[in-house]
Amino acid sequence: MLSYSYEENEHLLYWPESNRMKAIKEDNKRTMNYTMPGIKIDKLVTHFDPKIKVTQLIKVANFELAVDATSDILTMLGQGKDMSGRPSELNQFVLQVWAVRFQLLLALRLHTHLLAEIVQFEELDAPDLYYQYANPGKIGSLVPFTLRLIHAEALRFSPFPWKSIERINRLEQQVKNVISFFETSNRSSAHICDWKKTRKKALQEYMQAVNVLDKVVVETDDIKEKAIISQALMRMAMQAGDEKAMNYYAEKIDNNNSEDAVLHKTLRSLFSGCLESCSRTNIKKITSTGNLSPRVVNTAAIALLYAGKAKEAVEMFGKSKKILRGPMLSNLKTTAELCVPAVIKDAMMEKAEADQK
């Protein structure tokens, strides 16, 4: 079905608020249009009966006509050809039509068209993609999970296929966060079970991405590209808890002392539990270069924390010129809570938050 009751599916529509949405809540401005999509291709087939339903066309595998049917629907909704960048209504039904359209374009291997249209949705984090943006009485995301999966998968067909790993990684982590939230909120076991099934879909997407990128590593002659993809695959394997795959890709990473190589050696040590060696050797290497970028500082601080050196970890965070919003800010807060007085911790968090502006 392309539409269903919000009340009946409220638990499946829940989604953590993005930083963009949180910023809007603070400003209380809810009149802007952030997502203004429009189809890039009109008709794949010259003639078809508009009375035929999309679902009927899909059942008989007439995907070209089904794409054309979505073109007609989106055109009627103000999101037709040449309408990109113009305000139009966003709702649950519209986003589901787009999800169906993207699945069809993927099935037809029209990857160029898929990428051209899906890029309009950016990172699926715009405020107007949340129910609460226009309707404070409801909470959740207008974006169907099928659209999130395709959004992650689509980059496999771009000039930078390894970037799909980052999206799948982020998607799987967000689903884990939803499950954790439901468990701590004493939600029903049925709701938690539904989200665990959803996480399984994300992990299946991970396996598909790994297979595709593994092929890219073999086929490319670009040494730098091989290293980038292997590093991405290693991080993805760690996220999925796949130790065998993590070690496999770690061995493929260049064994020199470049920043990237040492950072990934540090991550591998953390994953394997070699904490003392990690904090003694790798941290010295990545901090001795003088390059204290947020990424270097965050990795070094976490290594120190896992080695039982919370105070040194806090000091390491202090060496960064800026604490980035997201994992780094969260890591600082967690670490400071372990070893710093509340007054000092609050001052550190206020400074970090001020740096975001």
Image: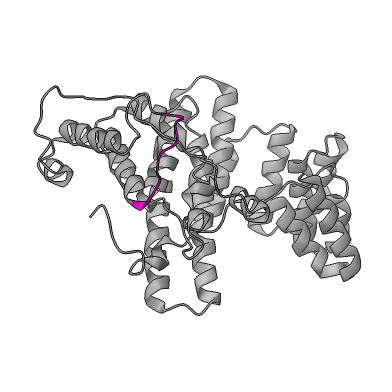
Residue extending furthest toward the front: 31
Residue 333 visible in the current orientation: yes
Q: In this rendering, would 203 be left or right of 184? A: left
Check the image and report above or below for 299 versus 179.
above
Residue 241 visible in the current orientation: no
Quarter the C terminus occupies: top right
**Who is closer to the viewer here, 119 or 177?**
119
Check the image and report above or below for 312 versus 339.
above
Colour scheme: one colour
Q: Give the x, y percent position of residue 145.
A: 39, 52
* Residue at horizontal 51 percent and vertical 62 percent from the top: 136
* Residue at horizontal 35 percent and vertical 34 percent from the top: 79
**Who is closer to the viewer here, 307 or 204?**
204
Q: In this rendering, would 310 be left or right of 269? A: right
Q: Is residue 325 magenta?
A: no
Q: Give the x, y percent position of residue 108.
A: 24, 31
Q: Give the x, y percent position of residue 133.
A: 52, 54
Q: Give the x, y percent position of residue 170.
A: 54, 49
Majority secondary structure of magenta residues: loop
* Residue at horizontal 81 percent and vertical 49 percent from the top: 354
**Who is closer to the viewer here, 12 or 338?**
12
Please state the extent of the stretch shown in magenta in the rendering. Answer: 84-92
Check the image and report above or below for 269 versus 338.
above
Q: How many marks?
A: 0
**Who is closer to the viewer here, 7 or 297?**
7
Q: In this rendering, would 254 be left or right of 303? A: left
Quarter the N terminus occupies: bottom left
Check the image and report above or below for 308 versus 293.
below
